[in-house]
Structures are given as C-alpha cells and as structure tokens.
Amino acid sequence: MRMASIAALGLAIATQAQEIYLTTTGYTTRPQCTKSTASPSYHFQPFSYSLKETVRYATSIPSPTTTKTYAPVYEDAAKHLRTTVSTSSWGNWLPGQTVISATDSSNPYGQAAWSSMWLNAGLQNYTTTGIFSTTVSPTPVPTSELVLPPRDYFGPTDCYNFPDDFIFGVAGSAAQIEGAVALEGRSPSLLEKFASASCPKDYVTDENYFYYKQDIERLAAMGVEYYSFSIPWTRILPFVLPGTPVNKQAIDHYNDLIDTVLDAGMQPVVTMLHFDSPLVFVASDNIDRVPIWVTFNEPLLYAFNFQGVDNVIHAHAQVYRFYHEELKATGKMSLKLNDNFGVPKNPKNNSDIDAANRFNEMQLAFFADPIFLGKQYPDSILHTLPGARQLNKTELKFIGQTADFFAIDPYTATVVSPADEGITACAANKSSSNSLFPYCVNQETKNVYGWNIGYRSESYVYITPTYFREYLSYLWNTFRHPILVSEFGFPLWKESEKELSDQRYDSTRSTYYLSYMSEILRAIHEDGVHVMGALAWSFIDNWEFGQPSQFGIQGVDPKSQERFYKKSFFDLVDFVKARQR
Ligand SMILES: *[C@@H]1O[C@H](CO)[C@@H](O)[C@H](O)[C@H]1NC(C)=O
Ligand SMILES: *[C@@H]1O[C@H](CO)[C@@H](O)[C@H](O)[C@H]1NC(C)=O
Ligand SMILES: *[C@@H]1O[C@H](CO)[C@@H](O)[C@H](O)[C@H]1NC(C)=O
Ligand SMILES: *[C@@H]1O[C@H](CO)[C@@H](O)[C@H](O)[C@H]1NC(C)=O
C-alpha cells in the first residue's frame, strides 16, 4: 500500500458511468427485463420459518505433488555476483538496550557495528517486541471459521469466466506485517523513522515474521492461489552494500516462507523493495522457486524527481538483465507502478483531456515508455522536471523491453482539469510555493455535475469500477503488455472503531472487490484487454505507516494476534471460484 500522505494526491469521476446507466430522461433502463403487465394475486398460505442461507464452506487448495523451478538454486546464483558472498548472524537488539556489549568493534560488519546501527537509529519508544520470539507452529483452521457469510442482495450479474492462467491472490508487504524490526539481524530502514512521533510504529504490527506459517495456512484454507509478499533488504543485507555479509537467519527465514507457501499449494510473488530499504541491489537469494518478481514497489512515491526515477529505471533494467540473461531464469519480472487514474473532468473538452493525458503520462510513461517500449522519456517530463535529460541510444537499448508484464496498483481514479493559470505557465513556475507543480493539473473527487465519483473510503480510495475498466484499457493499449493488478483494496470508514462482528461484515469492501473483479472480466471479454491477474490488498489489517486506515480482508486482535476472516474475503474467493472453468 502507498503512504497516505502522498496518496492524498489523488481521487476519482463518473460522467461516462452515468451515460451508461441513464437514459436522457434520467432513469435507469432495464433492457434485460420484458415488461410484466400481470396484476398481483393476493392469497393466504401456511407460514413457516426457514433458514435462508445454505451452509457452504471455503475449500482449501490441494497440496502440490511437484515444485517447478525458474532459476538456479541460491548457491549457483550467488556465483554470478561480482562480489564474494559471506554469511553471518547478528541476533537481536532488544527494547531498552542502550549499550553495545559486543567487543568486536574492529570488524566493520561485526556484532558491535550492527548494534551501533540500532543505537544510532534514534528509535523513539521502542518498548515492545510483541508476544512471539520464535516461529509459531501452524494449526489447521477449524471448519467453523470457514462457513460462508450471507450473500449481499445485490451483486455482479456477468456471465464470464476467468482464463485458465489468471492469477488470483492476495498481497502484503514486510514492513506492514512483520514486526520484529530489530530482531534476527535486521538493520534499520527508513520506515522506523517515517511515521510521525505521535503515530504507532512498525515494531510489532501483525508479528507475521513469527506468525507466517499460520497466516499462510489461513490463506490456503480459503482457497487463495497466489501470495504476494516482500523481502526486506535490511534483513538480507544488514550492511546494505554489495560485498557485505548476508544474514543467514534471513536467508533461512525466507527460504522457509517460500517453501511454506509452496507446500500449501500456493505460488509466491516476491517484491524486492517495498518502501523499506536502501536502493542497493545484488542478486537475491531464494531465486529458484519464485515465478513472479517485482523489483520496485510504487517508486514514484519515494523517487519523484528526475534523478530518482532515472536511477530506479537503470537499477530495474540491471536486475532484469541479471535475472534473465545471466541467471537464465524463466520467471517473470516487472516493477509496480501507481497512479490514481486521471480522467478528464469533461471528457468532451480537449483541455481536460490534455490535462489527464499529462497527469497519467508523468506518472506512468516516465517509467513505462523507456522500460516497456524502449522510448525516450515523455516531453512533459523533459520540459518540466529540473535536471531532466534524455536517455542516449545505449541507455535506451539497455532499458528497453525489460519487463514481462505491467504491474499496476489501480486503487481509484481522480478527476483532472488544467491548472487555473494554464499548464504551460504552471510548468514554467518551478517555485516551491507552486503546489500544483509538476503535474500542473487540478485534481478533484467530484464529477462535472458535482457528485462524488464513487463511494468514499476512510482515505483516498473511492469505489470507481467503471473508471477502473477504462484504466485497464488505457494501460493495455498504451504500454502493450499483459496487466497484473498488483494491489487493489478499500479501507472502510472508521472500521477499526467498530465492534468485531461489524468489522467482519464488511459489505462495502465486498462491493469494491466484486465490482472491480467484474469489470476485469468485462475488460478481458468485451474490450480484448489482457489482464493476467489480480492481487487483493491486503490479506490482513496491518501497519499503514501510522495511519488508522485498514485495508484487510482479515482482521487481527492486536493483543492475541488472533486473525479473523472478513466477509469480503469469502465473497472475493467465491466470486473467482464461481468463474473458473
Ligand atoms: C513515548 O511514549 C509516551 C507514553 O506512551 C508518550 O507520552 C510520548 O509522547 C512518546 N514519545 C515519542 C517521541 O513517541
Ligand atoms: C474546457 O476546459 C477548460 C479548462 O478546464 C475551460 O477553461 C474551458 O472553458 C472549457 N471549454 C469548454 C468548451 O467547455
Ligand atoms: C550514455 O549515457 C551513459 C550514462 O550517462 C554514459 O555512461 C554513456 O557514455 C553514454 N553513451 C553515449 C554513446 O553517449
Ligand atoms: C508561482 O506560483 C506561486 C504559487 O502559486 C505564485 O505565488 C507565483 O506568483 C508564481 N510565479 C510566477 C512567476 O508565476
């Protein structure tokens, strides 16, 4: 998930949606209904109570019989690095610890050096490590937890199926679920400093670092097929730079996590950088059994200046080429981009269309023109961002065609029109007081008639399924690669303040998921758009960078770490299973 402060950037619309559903006189037409002229016939009959719901249970996925591999095993992969790999272990930096007891201070990568990173991290109130200190053994999910909730009265009416190779799964990220920040050799990341002092930090969150086996068991029990997670750099390489020792405990941990996912019959999707570590890369461990890799998550949110994005693009291309050309690995690799789809305030007004194109181009084509199409940076970037320079021919050749699919986090949409002073004048005004720079567009959450573009969540997300479908079409036809919806989700208004039973009955989140999934099917079957999969964010309520909003399709009791499934999880799985051939 993105950080809410930056995410406040964007929101969404519905003029076209209205055109679909309204006649010119304004009321909904029902072309599928032949008009009934029959009059009612009132009558008596014996009355009896009935249970309206048939009891149905979620079905676990079958255990696998074989494991497919996509790359050489770790030991062989490590030989391709232009650096020697040594391993070590550092253990824990515990709450309240204020002195370094290790005496190996002459070793730049020793225990004392590792401890000093934590001593110097300036943690405020690092007082708790949660309730677990070792991996929790999983227990089977009782059948009583797997009874499907009542169906909502309204729901999708499509008649389409998902293609056989459609990827359906759920997502989370290490910093947001793991906790155990200073345990088992992890070094500090930016995030321990990120949230403001008054906000809760990531020290404990869902304790997934120790609870992952149970979390995976719970996903498998529901019938989830793909699990998307991230591997933090600060766990694998506490000293960050190439040539520094690899943390043995982290290698063992993520190896076991991947094996646990596979043993449960699911497939892993791995992100290498999800807001939580420095921009350093060497080949990853655990490379052999993972079919889908993501190098960077939403880089726009931490690298939006020319040099930052330029670095990300070069780094991505280098990792991609290492993976396919040196390791000869056969999995798929991409990076995850984000943009609240900019839709023109009035789709018949050329100024608004230009503004929307500029908004989307600056956030997406900036990365995707070079990476997916081998094209120069867009003019909007070159003419606006300070320090922007063209990629030369050698660079374009190196960067071009270095992604196997287009990963997008399309949570919602935003209504766009040009800055009041005009785009050109705004783009020329690089003063820091120019709040619309660099996009130079107005963003709103209301359509041209003044209605909200959709139902509002606790944060920037509005339920905008018809714009979502339009977005898929935009991406496919512009960047011409299969699309993975790598995150999408909805935080209900003040959900965490509700009673548990009300948190579980999250019908609005179901509406979000089922309407978006139904639009994916329409995009595939009616628009010819290749959508290769969708991963729901998030598989559990988690640490949202100190913000209260919760995106989980499971909830968690922070005192016991017990999880509970929400209705939307059942509804989403049920929607997919009903549409698999
Ligand atoms: C530390 O915790 C105390 C007690 O919960 C709180 O009053 C204080 O503001 C916190 N300080 C910081 C810097 O977070
Ligand atoms: C189109 O939009 C621009 C900017 O929002 C506005 O100034 C202009 O009047 C609009 N043109 C028409 C024909 O509505
Ligand atoms: C292209 O740009 C790269 C990076 O700035 C530079 O190292 C290289 O020499 C340039 N190549 C040409 C042919 O200009
Ligand atoms: C730049 O934008 C700021 C903030 O909108 C405004 O106060 C200032 O006058 C603008 N400068 C120019 C040269 O237009």
Image (spheres, rainbow, N blue to C red):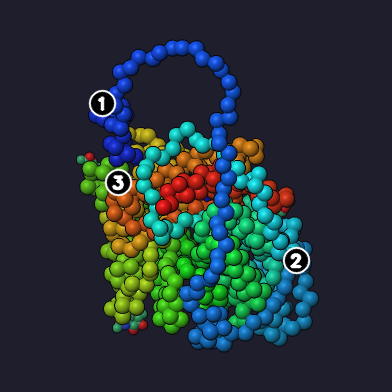
Q: Who comes first in sequence, dot 3 or dot 2?
A: 2
Q: Measure the alpha-carbon separation of dots 3 and 2.
A: 52 Å
Residue appearing at x 29%, y 27% in the figure: 34
Residue 406 is situated, as x and y percent measured from the top left of the image, at: 38, 62
Callout 2–callout 1 Cβ contact below 8 Å? no
Label 2 neighbourhood size at 10 Å, few (<14), some (14-19), many (20+)?
A: some
Label 3 neighbourhood size at 10 Å, few (<14), some (14-19), many (20+)?
A: many
Residue 169's tag is none
Q: Is mark 2 within 8 Å of ligand 1?
A: no
Residue 94's tag is 2
Q: Measure the alpha-carbon separation of dots 2 and 1.
A: 68 Å
Q: Amino acid at mark 1?
A: Thr
Callout 3–callout 2 Cβ contact below 8 Å? no
SS class, disc 2: loop
Q: Amino acid at mark 2?
A: Leu
In-front residue for pair 531/208: 531
Quickly name the residue at label 3.
344
Say if residue 69 shows up in the picture.
yes
Quickly name the residue at label 1.
25
Residue appearing at x 50%, y 56% in the figure: 169
Residue appearing at x 27%, y 47% in the figure: 352
Count up the numbered dots.
3
In-front residue for pair 53/120: 53
Q: Who comes first in sequence, dot 2 or dot 1?
A: 1
Q: Amino acid at mark 3?
A: Pro
Query: Nearer the observer, disc 2 or disc 1?
Result: 1
Q: Quadrant of residue 147?
A: top right
Say if residue 230 shows up in the picture.
no
SS class, disc 1: loop
Q: Quadrant of residue 98?
A: bottom right
